[in-house]
Image (tube, grey):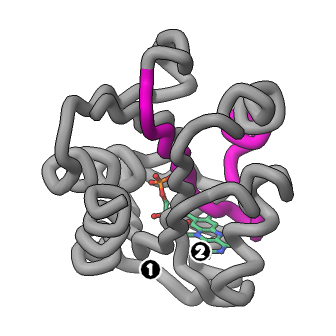
Amino acid sequence: MKNLIVYTTKYGSVEKSSKKLKEHLQGETTIINLKTENVPDIKDFDRIILGGSIYLGKVQKQLTKFACKNERLTSKKKIGLFVNSGKQNEKKDDQLKNSFPEKLYDNAVVTGLFGDEITIEKCSFLDKLALRIIKKVTISYSNIDDRAIKKFADILNNL
Ligand SMILES: Cc1cc2nc3c(=O)[nH]c(=O)nc-3n(C[C@H](O)[C@H](O)[C@H](O)COP(=O)(O)O)c2cc1C
């Protein structure tokens, strides 16, 4: 089995989640940061996993664009979708549904919410301000959901 994880991140928590997911997945796994690396040919992979993080209710637009562009190709693959998010204002399924094209979401064999992480020192001035005002967050924390990541991998491994 060949797995491809394509992700977007602003401050690195989705990268961490992707690496943890790789540890749990059976087979050979390639991890690609969509913003900094070229994506290999999707045809060469059995499972395609897309992951991003939510900012003000939305996932990174690069990921949405990539998902739309590859919707037809990915329809023949086993698809997994996940987001890292604080889940504060949006309903669980809405965050995932709003992040990916409808067909892709419907075609996904597994979806997951992998929790969130804030490293205040890495955040831009505006993000720090938004965190303080909207979310009342002023200190770093890590809430990456290891169990959700393991469960997501188990579902894929058992298909
Ligand atoms: C400025 C800012 C806005 C955010 N907005 C949301 C949001 O609207 N909904 C949500 O669930 N999480 C929100 N989060 C939490 C992020 O999705 C979470 O920290 C995630 O782990 C970041 O992943 P990344 O480091 O890979 O970009 C926000 C975080 C920041 C810093």
Q: Residue at x 40, y 67 (%)?
A: 118
Comparing 60 with 56, the one in front is: 60
Tell me the distance, in whole angstroms, between the alpha carbons under discs 1 and 2: 7 Å
Q: Is mark 2 within 8 Å of ligand 1?
A: yes
In magenta, the rendered stretch is 45-65
Q: Position of residue 147 (x, y in %)?
A: 25, 79
Judged from the image, the quadrant occupied by ligand 1 is: bottom right
Q: Position of residue 100 (x, y in %)?
A: 75, 53
Q: Earlier in the sequence, mark 1 or mark 2?
A: 2
Q: Report which quarter residue 34 is drawn in.
A: top right
Q: Residue at x 17, y 56 (%)?
A: 24
What's the amino acid at mark 1?
Thr
| Disc assigned to residue 138 | 1
Does the stretch in magenta take in 52?
A: yes
116 displayed left or right of 35: left
Comparing 48 with 136, the one in front is: 48
Comparing 94 with 55, the one in front is: 94
Decide: is 130 above or below 23. below
Q: Please give the residue where the numbered disc 2 appears in the rendered image.
A: 131
Residue 32 seen from this side: yes
Q: Residue at x 49, y 18 (%)?
A: 36
Q: Residue at x 19, y 37 (%)?
A: 27
Quadrant, the N terminus: top left
Q: Is mark 1 within 8 Å of ligand 1?
A: no
Does the stretch in magenta take in 51?
A: yes
Q: Position of residue 159 (x, y in %)?
A: 37, 59
Which element type, helix, strand or loop, lies under badge 2?
Answer: helix
Mark 1 and mark 2 residues within 8 Å of each other at the beta carbon? yes
Q: Position of residue 88 (x, y in %)?
A: 63, 88
